[in-house]
Amino acid sequence: MLNFIENLAKSAGRLALEARKRLTEEEVHFKNPKDLVTDVDREVEHFLRGKIMQAFPDHAILGEEEGISNTGRSEYQWIIDPIDGTTSFVHGAPLYSVSVGLYRNGKPYAGAIYVPRLDELYSASLGKGAFCNGKPIHVSGRSKLENCLGITGFACLRAGLPKNNLPHFCRIAPKIRDIRRYGSAAYNLCAVASGSADFFWEMQLNAYDVAAGVIILSEAGGKVTDFSGGEKYPENGIVASNGAVHDEILRLLAMD
Ligand code: IPD
Ligand code: CA
Ligand code: CA
């Protein structure tokens, strides 16, 4: 099964990479002034759905662009984001990814995230570890915030929410080594899983942004919770870390 998911994510990523070379302004659309979707997002999701339905006709599928389909016939549900980081994709920036998550009885079961411009394929399945291009990955061991690299995003600003992430950013950024803003929640989770960053937090994400990343991070030894330390992520915020700094991040986020 993991081999299928890895090949699917990589094929979809290569489709996106090639299609980007031909992208025109007419193919860029707006869900709102800051929330872009392109014909390539839709084409990639159609590709992913076709391959999944061909191989697993009973499985349910939730995708960002076409919603939910085929529910109630199987314990398996695919949760897919055809292009995570569409803004970067449109602007020609490198960090966008294809995210393919598989849940079983409502729990993370397997996942793959492919970053075409980096040619990095992150993957994991339950109880079998996490990998990048076939090599095992593990979270960092950093336990002091001042030595940590943090990542965040601002989905909340894009959604125009009055209660947003800026106060958290201003409170956390001065306490850590540095902050990164990669623009793909799926890739952010892989960066923590591989140890190239130590924690990630964000508000206002959706299931398809994180479905594959959460099992990759967990299998890499990381910890994922909502902002109050529970399991209602991403709807109640998401905090993903190497485990060592998790409680400190929750404490800083709670200081509203
Ligand atoms: C977005 C990216 C971004 C996050 C946004 C997401 P999309 O995904 O993951 O990092 O901050 O909230 O919506 O819209 O490009 O699939
Ligand atoms: Ca997304
Ligand atoms: Ca997307």
Image (spheres, rainbow, N blue to C red):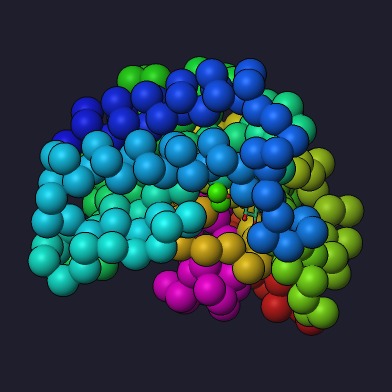
Residue at 39%, 20% in the rendered image: 133
230 falls in the magenta region: yes
Q: Quadrant of residue 172?
A: bottom right
Is residue 206 shown to the viewer in this render? Answer: yes
Question: In this orientation, which residue lies closer to the viewer: 170 or 166?
Answer: 166
Classify residue 100 as left or right of residue 144: left
Report x, y in % for residue 187: 56, 39
Q: Is residue 14 above or below residue 81?
A: above
201 falls in the magenta region: no
Residue at 36%, 54% in the rendered image: 79
Residue at 63%, 68% in the rendered image: 204
Report x, y in % for residue 197: 63, 38
Question: In this orientation, which residue lies closer to the viewer: 124 or 117?
Answer: 117
Report x, y in % for residue 183: 69, 44
Q: What secondary structure characterizes most of the magenta part?
A: loop
Q: Is residue 90 above or below residue 201?
A: above
Question: In this orientation, which residue lies closer to the viewer: 174 or 41?
Answer: 41
Is residue 125 shown to the viewer in this render? Answer: no
Report x, y in % for residue 53: 20, 46
Residue at 16%, 71% in the rendered image: 72
Identify the magenta region: 223-242
